[in-house]
Amino acid sequence: MAAISIRKLVKRYGHGAKAQQVIHGVDAEVHDGEFVVIVGPSGCGKSTLLRMVAGLEEVSEGEIAIGPRVVNDIEPADRDIAMVFQNYALYPHMSVAENMAYGLKLRKMPKAEIDERVQRAAKILELGHLLARKPRELSGGQRQRVAMGRAIVRDPQVFLFDEPLSNLDAKLRVQTRLEIQKLHRELGVTSLFVTHDQVEAMTLAQRIIVMNGGRIEQIGTPEEVYGQP
Ligand code: ADP
Ligand code: ADP
């Protein structure tokens, strides 16, 4: 079954005469457990598409389903997804552990289960020794791992990544990319990853969606899209 189904999706920003259409009827499916990367030049609509899957932008026309459920009218918090952002979006006044626990507390999860999930995520991401620190006391790579930890504790059906590596220096970018690969191997969570970086797409993707001008230009394996390495 498809983990994400996108049907005849249209997005317009603004209203009336000022409306600007930026997604022009996109159809795509992401299979259960699959790692799909959306690539394309800046401004082609990648982030808008991902944000609609996350529920952070309204759908103008068409349909998005996560699993069997159409989510057009479902709040972001009630979708079975977790998003990892480019700028980490951590709360500066909270510790690493509190940052990871926050979303679960909002959902009124029992404390024992929250602690267990935070510990498990910290172990996967090797953050155990940093749980009491504040974000400002962490390196960029550590902050991005906390952002991933916050996604993991939700135990979602789908991970959404919005250019999570683009604020990291070259070395950390490679390291964090390997961590994301390991994460996908270990947890097997369906992943939709947006980037403008061809190397990221080639190394992470099982399938690549190439976007241009608000449309899908091509969908295929890295070999099909970029040729044999
Ligand atoms: P990408 O992620 O591929 O760089 P975006 O989805 O950010 O592309 O943007 C696609 C187009 O939509 C661009 O022309 C951008 O300027 C426009 N856009 C993005 N967000 C908004 C917004 N909130 N209001 C109006 N236009 C927007
Ligand atoms: P990204 O690289 O993630 O697309 P941007 O710097 O393009 O980030 O956009 C940052 C924020 O501004 C996003 O929330 C996006 O939706 C919004 N945005 C982007 N383009 C426009 C635009 N033309 N008008 C209004 N908001 C925009």
Image (tube, grey):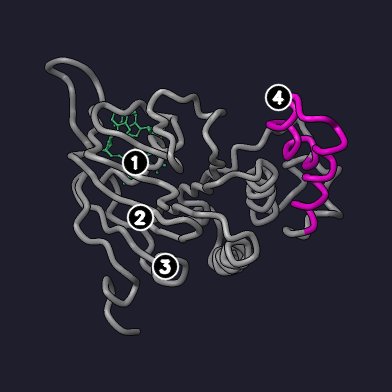
Q: Mark 1 is on which residue type? A: Leu
Q: Residue at x 26, y 41 (%)?
A: 7
Q: Residue at x 40, y 51 (%)?
A: 2
**Cα–Cα gap, marks 1 and 2:** 9 Å
Callouts 3 and 2 close, C-beta under 8 Å: no
Mark 1 vs mark 3, foreground winner is: 3
Q: Residue at x 70, y 26 (%)?
A: 107
Q: Which mark is residue 77?
A: none
At mark 1, the secondary structure is helix
Callouts 1 and 4 close, C-beta under 8 Å: no
At mark 4, the secondary structure is helix
- Image location (x, y in percent) of residue 206: 42, 67
Callouts 1 and 2 close, C-beta under 8 Å: yes
Q: Is residue 76 above or below residue 126?
A: above
Residue that mark 3 sits on: 206
Residue that mark 1 sits on: 49
Magenta stretch: dominant SS? helix
**Cα–Cα gap, marks 1 and 4:** 27 Å
Mark 2 vs mark 4, foreground winner is: 4
Residue that mark 4 sits on: 106
Q: Which mark is residue 38?
A: 2
Q: Mark 3 is on which residue type? A: Gln
Q: Is residue 114 above or below residue 58?
A: below
